[in-house]
Each structure stands twice: as C-alpha cells, then as structure tokens.
Amino acid sequence: MRRKFRQRPPQSAQSILQQIAQVVHNPARERFELWVAGDLVGVLGYSTDIVDGHKTITVLHTVLYDEYSGHGLGTRLTRTIIQYAREQNARLRPVCSFTKHYLDRHPGIVELAPV
C-alpha cells in the first residue's frame, strides 16, 4: 500500500525572509536594524526631540540592500518605528520618503508632528 504525502505549497521568498528577518532597536545609534541570517541588511534611522512641548520622533531614512527590497522588509521597519512612537507617546515626523509614502497610504495610524 502506497502512502500519500500531502505536499505543502512552496513558500515565497517574501514569506521566508519575513520569518528569518529580525528587527533590533539600537537606541545608542538611534536606529532600528534589520538582520537576516546574522547579516545587517537594513536600517531605519531616527532622531528624538521635543517640539512644541511634544516628544517627536523624526524618521530620517530607511535603507535596505537592493537584494532585500521588494519583500516587505522596509514596511516592517516602518511599522516598527510606528509602534515605537506609540509606546513612547510621541508624534512622528517622516522626513524619509519611504515612511512618508507609507503614512500617506495609512492615514491616522500614528499622530504626526506638524512639518
């Protein structure tokens, strides 16, 4: 008698990368780092200031190695800084074009600082 084995559908590269990628906060360097298999492959840099009496986190840049772009990892970094801003009860100021574009597509998910 032959056994039938169910084949799992193959995972996409994006799915695999999301599973093995790790975002680490490096407050000493004011950035979130994206690590894949022990390699630093992306960063989201920020600065924190008090503006008009409110804690404000300015997202300066989001950088990924080219081979890791297009897999949702930049979005993962952006979601991490949004969550961090919420935890810090801070407003967010997106100078980074990637973050600004994300926030334009998802209005109201975090309080924005006036430009």
Image (cartoon, helix red, strand yellow):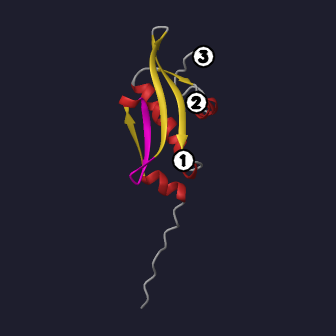
* Magenta-drawn segment: 30-40
- The residue under label 1 is 65
Image quarter of the C terminus: top right
Residue bearing mark 2: 96
Residue 24 bears which disc, if any?
Answer: none
Q: CA distance from mark 2 to mark 3?
A: 13 Å
Whether 39 is among the magenta residues is yes
> Which one is closest to the eye, mark 3 or mark 1?
1
* Crowdedness near tag 3: few (<14), some (14–19) or many (≥20) residues, C-alpha within 10 Å: few
Prevailing secondary structure class for the magenta stretch in the rendered image? strand
Callout 1: 10 Å neighbours few (<14), some, many (20+)? Answer: few
Residue 35 x, y percent position in the rendering: 42, 47
Q: Quadrant of the N terminus?
A: bottom left
Instruction: Residue 71 in the image: state x and y as whole percent.
Output: 56, 50
Q: Residue at x 49, y 8 (%)?
A: 52
Q: Counting residues from the N terminus, which is met first, the one under dot 3 or under dot 1?
A: 1
Which of 29 and 22 lies nearest the eye of the viewer?
A: 29
Side (left or right) of 56 relative to 69: left
- Discs 2/1, front: 1
In what element is the residue under mark 1? loop
Q: For the point 37% across and 34% down, which residue is it?
A: 26
Q: Secondary structure at mark 2?
A: loop
Give the percent coordinates (x, y) of residue 2: 44, 88
The earlier-in-sequence mark between 2 and 1 is 1
SS class, disc 3? loop
Closer to us: 35 or 6: 35
Ranked by sequence position, the earlier of labels 2 and 3 is: 2
Q: Which residue is mark 3?
A: 115
Task: Report, in whole angstroms, how far the alpha carbon at label 2 lies from the one at label 1.
Answer: 16 Å
| CA separation in Å, label 3 and label 1 | 29 Å
Kind of residue at disc 3:
Val
